[in-house]
Image (cartoon, rainbow, N blue to C red):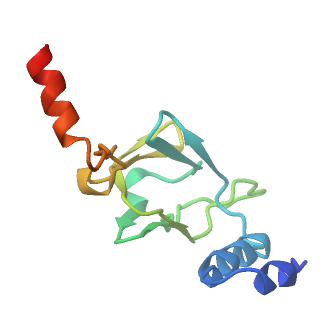
Amino acid sequence: MRTDLSPFWRSSVGFDRLFDLVNDTVNDSDNYPLYDIARIGVDQYQISLALAGFSPDEITVTAEQSTLTVEGKAKKGDYNYLYQGISMRPFRRVFNLADYVQVKDAAFENGMLKIALVREVPEAMKPRRIAIEVAGNENQQTEQKQAA
């Protein structure tokens, strides 16, 4: 299923990457492993991946500049399965991170890999209030200070 984004292409400039990401997400047919993304706080997020059958040493988490990659490859067991319903196939899941989002840590518990993310905007990039000075009122302000 292809999403038609042509109305947005006509009325936008500079959003090519955003539309490509939306198209890739909509058309992504491989949904393994299952995952959740939750907002924990104002600038805190958590990605949880369901990795039943995997052990922590079979999983690799790599954080690059704006990308988080989780890869897994289960070791072959000495089992002769009569039925294998738990999918333990190799996987590679890539998450695109927004600006200033950093990976804080990762924990593996009860078959769930939980990756904590935090958004840390530098002070220089945060909005700040600028005082407005009124031109020509310098004499009035001085007189008011002297009167008080």
Whether residue 113 appears in this view of the structure is no
Q: Which image quarter holds the C terminus?
A: top left
The quarter of the picture where residue 141 lies is top left
94 horizontally vs 56: left or right? right
**Residue 104 appears at what percent x and percent y?**
32, 48
146 horizontally vs 96: left or right? left
| Location of residue 95 with respect to 48 vertically, above or below | below
Which of the two residues, 96 or 140, is positioned nearer the viewer here? 140
Q: Which residue is at 69% across, 53% downward?
A: 86
Q: Which residue sits furthest top?
A: 148
The quarter of the picture where residue 100 lies is bottom left
Q: Which image quarter holds the N terminus?
A: bottom right
**Residue 81 appears at what percent x and percent y?**
70, 59
**Residue 13 appears at what percent x and percent y?**
65, 84
| Location of residue 75 with respect to 127 vertically, above or below | below
Which of the two residues, 135 or 75, is positioned nearer the viewer here? 135
Whether residue 84 appears in this view of the structure is yes
Q: Which residue is at 37% across, 49% downward?
A: 127
